[in-house]
Image (cartoon, rainbow, N blue to C red):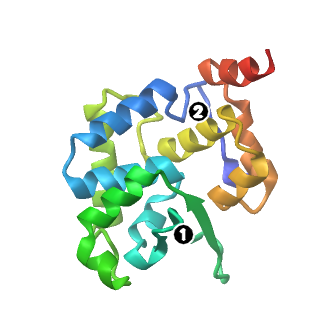
Amino acid sequence: MDGGLRLYSNDGKRLYLNGPERAAFLAAARRAPDETRLFCWIMAYTGCRISEALSLSAGSFQVDAEVVAFRSLKKRNKIVFREIPLPSDLVADLRDVFRPMFATACDAPLWHLSRVTAWRRVKHIMDLAGIDGPQANPKGLRHAFGVHAVARGVPELMLQRWLGHADLKTTAIYAQAVGPEERQIAARMW
């Protein structure tokens, strides 16, 4: 596995947000100031890493196609981009809030935050959503994206590309989710 990627801690605690927690996170972010809300939604709807979200500029988006292109920052000595589709409402909100930047396809970052400040903002939204435990962090959002995608039937090869995994074995970890997520997967079979 990729760097010990796992969905459960050594003591069996979940390291990803489950469906209700993910919904609570998105709802709590809806009440945050625009820039925080959009940062949190980008993280939740794309499964990106904080550093990848912080590197986004207006030029990273294909607004008409409703797609964002992330530079995979974990590809040492290689420049690799991956495109992820976005919900229409998110694209419209990004374009409205960052209107001057989108009007000129500016290459300046959308968010002028340090990695630590961005982490704290995501964590604050999780606190507001009542999410507590080892899953209550930005990595838990990335894992939630993977679990949610598998539960909704996104093909593993597509999810691999969206998450920027070099090896399909890394992506396959998301099929190991249990509980309500496993029931959703099993329900497709019934």
**Dot 1: few (<14), some (14–19), or many (≥20) neighbours within 10 Å?**
many
The percent position of residue 64, horizontal first and vertical second, equals 48, 68
| Residue at 80% from the left image edge and 20% from the top image edge | 189
> Amino acid type of disc 2?
Ser
**Dot 2: few (<14), some (14–19), or many (≥20) neighbours within 10 Å?**
few
Is residue 135 or residue 109 the one in the foreground? 109
The percent position of residue 48, horizontal first and vertical second, equals 52, 57
The percent position of residue 177, horizontal first and vertical second, equals 67, 29
In the displayed structure, 190 sits above or below 136; it is above
> Amino acid type of disc 1?
Phe
* Whether residue 120 is visible: no
Left or right for 20, reference 126: right
Left or right for 91, reference 161: left
| Residue farthest top in this picture | 190
Which residue was labeled with disc 1? 70
Is residue 137 or residue 181 the one in the foreground? 181
Question: On the rendered image, what quadrant is the C terminus found in?
Answer: top right
| Residue farthest left in this picture | 33
- Disc with the residue nearer the chain's start (1 vs 2): 2
Is residue 17 or residue 157 the one in the foreground? 157
| Residue at 59% from the left image edge and 70% from the top image edge | 72
Cα–Cα gap, marks 1 and 2:
28 Å
| Residue at 75% from the left image edge and 63% from the top image edge | 166
The disc label shown at residue 9, or none: 2
In the displayed structure, 103 sits above or below 166; it is below
The percent position of residue 51, horizontal first and vertical second, equals 45, 66
Asked which quadrant contains residue 163, the reply is: bottom right
